[in-house]
Amino acid sequence: MSKKLKAAIIGPGNIGTDLLMKMQRSEWIEPVWMVGIDPESEGLKRAEQMGIKTCATGVDGLLPHVIEDAIRVAFDATSAYVHAENSRKLNELGVIMVDLTPAAIGPYCVPPVNLEAHAKNLELNVNMVTCGGQATIPMVAAVSRVQPVEYGEIIATVSSRSVGPGTRQNIDEFTRTTAGAVEKVGGAKRGKAIIIINPAEPPLIMRDTIHCLTEGEPDQATITESVHQMVKEVQKYVPGYRLVNGPVFDGNRVSCFMEVEGLGDFLPKYAGNLDIMTAAGLRTAEMFAEEAANGTITLPERG
Amino acid sequence: MNLNGKKVTLHDMSLRDGMHAKRHQISLDEMVNIATGMDEAGMPLIEVTHGDGLGGASVNYGFPAHSDEEYLNAVVPKMKNAKISALLLPGIGTVDHLKMAKDCGVSTIRVATHCTEADVSEQHIGMAAKMEMDTVGFLMMAHMVSPEKILEQAKLMVSYGANCIYATDSAGYMLPDEVTAKIGLLRAELPSSVEIGFHGHHNMGMAIANSLAAIEAGASRIDGSVAGLGAGAGNTPLEVFCAVLDRMGVETGIDLYKIMDVAEDRVFPIMDQPIRVDRDALTLGYAGVYSSFLLFAQRAEKKYGISARDILVELGRRGTVGGQEDMIEDLALTMAKEKGLI
């Protein structure tokens, strides 16, 4: 029996398609279904051409095939509005849900920080926070694992072309969710998040700045080492994750300046903000597959 | 130019844009003192917020001496006639801040986006309009795109519920002909129920001329700040503008001598540095860079030995937009590395 877990992607848009392309290279996850709601959608056609089963009737169209096709993990790349229902229906059938929407029903997951804990607990729904969160929270955690962080602030600057209508209509959700995860996952006592959209042409590569205010004088040597280690951890799934400058120390302020270049699978390389979401989502599912193969977790029983 | 008989609403920025020039450290007493002086002089609208708008308190933009709520609660109850406005940049502040401002008695909300990104303002403009506030869409860095693009973005903001649209010269880059073209197209194409506004900066010494061009082209709200206290070389100095408008027969409802006194006796004394077209402020205007970058670039010059002018020119070349203050230290570090300084 293959060690690979079989997967469904819900939402055949840019994110879903990029995820599919990454998944086709995965040693641990095998894409089987792509689920949409519009039979004419380009994304479904692309998936079909790539040899993936498709349905245009939403998650309900997938449900009858979940058991026979041994679907164990689903990625939701739709919207926060429909995610709760999608998740409920698939969780009932023992499918682990990786939530790429801002719905955040399940715990936040930032792979190098807390994925292992979620996998060991067999969380049936994990949320991938936001692109800005994935790009910055590892750095907050890199500081907070050395010494307490009284305040963590992140500024994500993304190219206008890489920000879809969903994010634009509810940009507050980005700032709130990211700030919350800077606290809950990053370990800062208080968190703040800022997003800037830049329309420059050619589009700029995603940039992120992370400021931490430490309690007491920052331990410069240990923090610097911790930051470099954490960058390497993220680079395992996002090779274009780079520390451009820093950590810079100024009083109790620790600042890191990052650039996130994507792999350029379906999304262009500048859209590192989208790439880090799909890569983190896939990395998350892979960890569940690895743990299941190692026997450290047992996937839900089903008929 | 004949503006005789026109009426304009002047909107003071010294307690919001001026916060940039004061590193957001204006005291509550100073704020109340200046605001009450302006109220007595007949200033109809006064903006009170962190320089980067509601929720701007941050490492990135600077922590203010007091919270937005504290400033608003100090100023609003003291106003006899003047109304108080607040600025909000989606991506920095949220609708929670907006509701707080409304609860504090703010009557005008100005929702600011980069001039090509108006669609991030839907939830904020929608909420302010729903609460029946005077709701302004504020298109920043308007020099960066064509009049047609500004109009397209303005229409989005109007569709969300804005009753006034600003073309904002955040970099102090525009010359009068450009102001005429942009304001003129907005006035020609937007419904007459939608007011048009102009916000200038004095980085190229054009703030008064640009504001006059805006009025001639159909703007009925003009931003400025008493004594020019604002980012970069400051905003259109309102006491000067009042005198000019008075000579031209434009009605503002403001007492010229009283506003001159507020500038001289209340605003000028709180300035940390002269607000003038110095080398770096001129570079902002010349290179088309967001005015509040000025002090950040000057601090980076001191810390990393790279001239503020070189940093600002490079920021302009890279197409940076409002809010990207974090780029300044990052860029200074990169430039210092390249020069072997660190």
Image (tube, coloured by chain):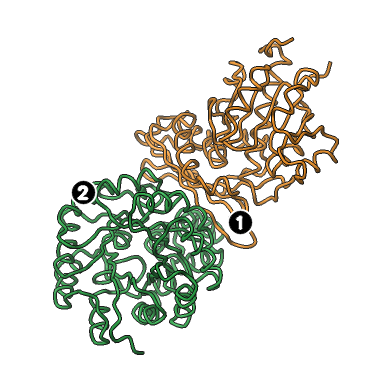
Tag 2 and tag 1, C-beta contact below 8 Å: no
Q: Is residue A18 above or below residue B198?
A: above
Secondary element under disc 2, as helix, strand or loop, is helix
Q: Residue at x 49, y 29 (%)?
A: A185
Q: Residue B167: horizontal and vertical position, in percent? A: 44, 69
* Residue carrying label 1: A204
Viewer-nearest residue: A27 or A96: A96
Q: Amino acid at mark 2?
A: Asn
Chain identifier, colour green: B
Q: Quadrant of the C terminus of chain A?
A: top right
Q: Which subunit holds the residue at mark 2?
A: B
Q: Which mark is residue B73?
A: 2
Q: Is residue B235 above or below residue A271?
A: below
Q: Residue B317: horizontal and vertical position, in percent? A: 55, 67
Q: Residue at x 51, y 60 (%)?
A: B156
Alpha carbons under labels 2 and 1: distance apart: 41 Å
Q: Which subunit holds the residue at mark 1?
A: A
Which quadrant holds residue B268? Answer: bottom left
Q: Amino acid at mark 1?
A: Leu
Q: Residue at x 42, y 62 (%)?
A: B138
Tell me, what hue is chain A? orange
Q: Residue at x 72, y 37 (%)?
A: A36
Secondary element under disc 1, as helix, strand or loop, is loop
Q: Is residue B288 left or right of residue A162?
A: left
Viewer-nearest residue: A44 or B188: B188
Which quadrant holds residue B279? Answer: bottom left
